[in-house]
Image (cartoon, rainbow, N blue to C red):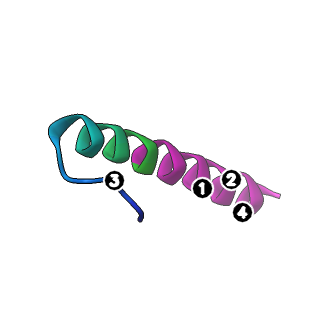
Amino acid sequence: MFCGDANTCNVMYCIGITSALGSMLIDFKNEKEKN
């Protein structure tokens, strides 16, 4: 995952985006497995 320089704001922002993308991917995978 690309993150900017390691100041706290960028780290928190990066973690937020990574988590959001991760949960989107998990939801997508779960939807596909249902069908």
| Disc 3 from disc 2: Cα separation | 27 Å
Q: Do the residues labelled 1 and 3 touch (CB within 8 Å)?
A: no
Query: Tag 1: residue type?
Result: Leu
Disc 3: CA contacts within 10 A as few (<14), some (14-19) or many (>=20): few
- On residue 28, the disc is 2
Residue depicted at x 29% and y 42%: 10
Residue depicted at x 53% and y 49%: 21
Measured as percent of width and height from the top left, residue 30 is found at 64, 55
* Mark 3 or mark 2, earlier in chain: 3
Q: Quadrant of residue 12?
A: top left
Q: Do the residues labelled 3 and 4 touch (CB within 8 Å)?
A: no
Hey, which residue is sitting farthest top in the picture? 9
Q: Does the magenta portion include 28?
A: yes
Hey, which residue is sitting farthest front in the picture? 5
**The magenta stretch spans which residues?**
19-35
* Mark 2 or mark 4, earlier in chain: 2
Of discs 1 and 4, which sits in the foreground?
1
The residue singled out by tag 3 in the image is: 4
